[in-house]
Image (cartoon, grey):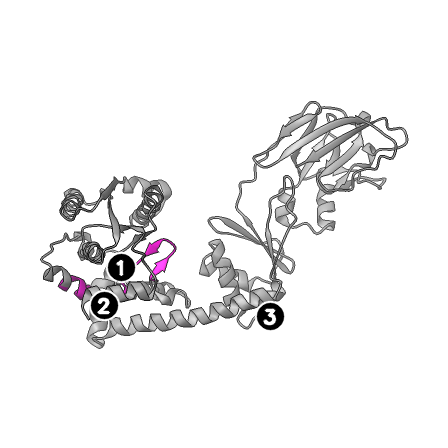
């Protein structure tokens, strides 16, 4: 089968591209990306090219850029270009040059995709790239997900060349008398992928000439097996109450709660946990430690880039990572006040009326206005805070109250209180008011505090 037919079949088999939509081709100037550009143009897809100059190889970087400019001009394909200060970015974010280049490249592609209203970004990964990725994952330690290698599509990233090998690409370019540039750093075995490509793969091919085909075929089998596993997990998740969410009101942040019992009742608890937590950016090693600590001491916290996970009794609690700001606002008089981006505080002073009933909802507190000394202050609860809970004679530590109510660590960290000008806590927000400020038979004015 000719290369064009093989790529066309692969695109159709995996439903990768639509001729009525626009796509970006990531063009480095190397053989792989040049081949991808020519093939998609020949197959009559709507394409525009994008080239990144990372300024890492001196004159060679500008040579590559100029090549891409001339090639796209000759083919009448629009080209988008960008220059990056890659070394500075890597130093600033304390990551490797390779990781910096990857972050910058994919961030730019995605922003460009949105700007020009493209459907996806076509990357020129081929079979050897997929096999190299599998070997890298295997060396690092991986599960079935990592053994799948590179997928034909991941979100808006599309890889139409995964069905062909490097030698197919070189043959196609030679047949079409199309030249390309070579990145000299790819010829030095100084990074992990280059070591695998230049040293390990030739050794494996000596053992078995069909090693690329065999490993790639194994990856396809594992992809199919993974689909079966994921279907079983989805069915289990729909049949069992795995998650419960808090009633997120006012100034409290929402979270998801996972019952550990539901995890352990699955045929493969650790894999189910991986399936769930990988969606929250937790790494495989983190998930392994979380699984080992399912029945460990409550209060242990793990953090991913975007989320935090807490072991709390027989539950795992997940919430989005947010900086705990010691935000305090002082309210001098009745009115409406903005607390943060999503919450407001409404203070009203109203005369008592016949048939009045104190608030029983969590968002509203009703107090004797004449007992409260203005201004009042809203702040986070602090260690040592005390108040006299409604209906009690003595005082109680707020920390003890929260523990008695089985509040988890995340809830305790976000618990707000309102105190008056004398420093008396009049309301543990959403939980209980102070008995000393309750409405009684002598009350003439009501202070209504509402959080929305």
What span is in magenta?
151-171
Q: Which dot marks residue 304?
A: none
Q: Are marks 2 and 3 in contact (CB under 8 Å)?
A: no
**Compared to 310, does 433 lie above or below?**
above
Q: Give 198 or 35, whichever is nearer the viewer.
A: 35
Residue 431: image x %, image y %? 73, 43
Which label's residue is closer to the chain start, 2 or 1? Answer: 1
Residue at 28% across, 60% down = 160
Residue at 54% across, 63% down = 291
Element type at marker 1?
loop
* Residue 405 in view of the camera: yes
Looking at the image, the residue that sits furthest to the bottom is: 208
Residue at 76% across, 24% down = 373
Residue 196: image x %, image y %? 25, 63
Quadrant the N terminus occupies? bottom left
Q: Which dot marks residue 201?
A: 2
Looking at the image, the residue that sits furthest to the left is: 177
Asked if the stretch drawn in magenta spans residue 342, the answer is no
Element type at marker 3?
loop
Nearest-to-viewer mark from 3 and 1: 1
Residue 354 relative to residue 60: left or right: right
Which label's residue is closer to the chain start, 3 or 1? Answer: 1
Q: Which residue is mark 1?
A: 125
Count every numbered label the image shows and give the total: 3
Quadrant the C terminus occupies? top right
| Circle 3 crowding by C-alpha within 10 Å: few under 14, some 14–19, many from 20 | few
Residue 92 relative to residue 369: left or right: left
Q: Which residue is mark 3?
A: 265
Residue 48: image x %, image y %? 25, 47
């Amino acid at each position: 089968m000719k290369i064009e037919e093989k790529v066309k079949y692969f695109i159709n088999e995996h439903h990768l591209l639509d001729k009525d939509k626009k796509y970006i081709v990531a063009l480095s100037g190397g053989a792989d990306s040049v081949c991808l550009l020519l093939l998609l143009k020949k197959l009559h897809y709507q394409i525009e090219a994008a080239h990144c100059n990372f300024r890492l190889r001196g004159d060679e970087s500008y040579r590559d850029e100029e090549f891409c400019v001339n090639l796209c001009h000759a083919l009448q394909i629009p080209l988008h270009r960008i220059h990056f200060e890659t070394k500075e970015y890597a130093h600033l974010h304390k990551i490797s040059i390779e990781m910096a280049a990857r972050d910058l490249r994919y961030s730019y592609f995605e922003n460009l995709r949105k700007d020009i209203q493209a459907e996806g970004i076509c990357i020129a990964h081929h079979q050897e790239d997929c096999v190299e990725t599998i070997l890298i994952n295997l060396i690092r330690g991986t599960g079935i997900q990592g053994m799948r290698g590179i997928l034909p599509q991941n979100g808006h990233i599309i890889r139409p060349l995964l069905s062909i090998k490097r030698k197919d690409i070189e043959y196609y370019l030679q047949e079409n008398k199309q030249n390309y540039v070579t990145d000299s750093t790819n010829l030095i075995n100084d990074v992990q992928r280059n070591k695998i490509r230049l040293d390990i793969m030739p050794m494996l091919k000596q053992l078995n000439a069909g090693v690329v085909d065999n490993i790639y075929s194994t990856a396809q089998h594992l992809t199919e097996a993974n689909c079966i596993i994921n279907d079983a997990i989805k069915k289990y998740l729909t049949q069992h109450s795995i998650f419960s969410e808090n009633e997120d009101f006012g100034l409290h942040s929402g979270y998801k709660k996972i019952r550990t019992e539901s995890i352990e009742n699955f045929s493969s608890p650790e894999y189910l946990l991986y399936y769930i937590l990988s969606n929250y950016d937790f790494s495989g090693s983190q998930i392994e430690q979380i699984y080992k600590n399912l029945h460990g001491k409550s209060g242990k916290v793990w953090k991913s880039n975007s989320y935090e996970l807490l072991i709390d009794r027989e539950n795992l609690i997940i919430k989005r990572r947010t900086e705990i700001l010691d935000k305090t606002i002082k309210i001098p008089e009745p009115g409406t006040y903005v607390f943060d981006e999503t919450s407001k505080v409404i203070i009203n002073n109203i005369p008592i009326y016949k048939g009045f009933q104190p608030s029983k909802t969590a968002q509203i507190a009703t107090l004797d206005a004449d007992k409260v000394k203005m201004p009042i202050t809203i702040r986070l609860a602090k260690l040592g805070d005390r108040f006299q809970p409604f209906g009690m004679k003595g005082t109680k530590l707020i920390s003890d109250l929260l523990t008695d109510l089985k509040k988890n660590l995340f809830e305790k960290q976000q618990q707000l209180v309102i105190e008056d000008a004398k420093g008396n806590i009049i309301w543990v927000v959403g939980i209980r008011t102070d008995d000393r400020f309750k409405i009684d038979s002598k009350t003439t004015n009501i202070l209504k505090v509402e959080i929305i």
